Amino acid sequence: MNWFDMFPQSLIKLKYMERYNLALAAKKIYDTGICFFDIKSLNHILKIKKHSTFYFVLRQLISQKILIKIEKNKYLLENSKINDFTLSNFLYSPSYISFDSALNYYGILPQFSYEITASTTIKKQKLKNLMIKYFHIFT
């Protein structure tokens, strides 16, 4: 019995597995000029057909610290200069900066708020790692 007979399924996967260059993937991402990505936009940018190859490349981009995973299916480009308000809107869309944050931004409130307060029509939980508080508005 030779090696080919012992692992027939592995050979099929190797034979049909799509190859992808990580440096090319990083270049495509940086060339877009976008800081925030979801799965759909990353797949559109990278144009990888096979889901297994796409998720493998995505894991490699995260491990090489090119992308940061913010939450499920949402990623941020490493070393990007972002506005906290923009990040807040990306995480929960549609939403808008409101209450204390908006008043503080325009200098109406004398207190400094450490949290970003946003209003949204989507009911979601508060993020644990970020200082963003979302309020559900009943419509």
Image (tube, helix red, strand yellow):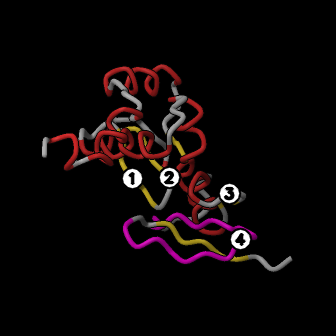
Whether the residues at callouts 2 and 3 have beta carbons within 8 Å, the answer is no
Q: Earlier in the sequence, mark 2 or mark 3?
A: 2
* Residue beneath disc 3: 93
| Residue with the most extreme front position | 1
- Residue 110 locus on image (x, y percent): 52, 65
Disc 1 to disc 3, C-alpha distance: 17 Å
- Left/right placement of residue 110 relative to residue 96 reads left
Which one is earlier in the sequence, the residue at label 1 or at label 2?
A: 1
The residue under the point 55% across, 47% down is 38
> What's the magenta bit mostly, secondary-structure-wise?
loop
Q: Which residue is mark 4?
A: 122
Q: Where 65 falls versus 92 (above or below)?
A: above
CA separation in Å, label 4 and label 3: 8 Å
Spatial CA distance of label 1 from label 4 is: 21 Å
Q: Local crowd at mark 3 within 10 Å, few (<14), some, or many (≥20)?
A: few
Report the mark closest to the observer, 1 or 4.
1
Tell me the magenta residue range.
112-129
Amino acid residing under circle 2: Lys
Q: In the structure shown, which secondary structural element does the residue marked by tag 3 occupy?
A: loop
**Which amino acid type corresponds to the residue marked 4 in the rendered image?**
Ile
Where residue 94 sits, quadrant-wise, is: bottom right
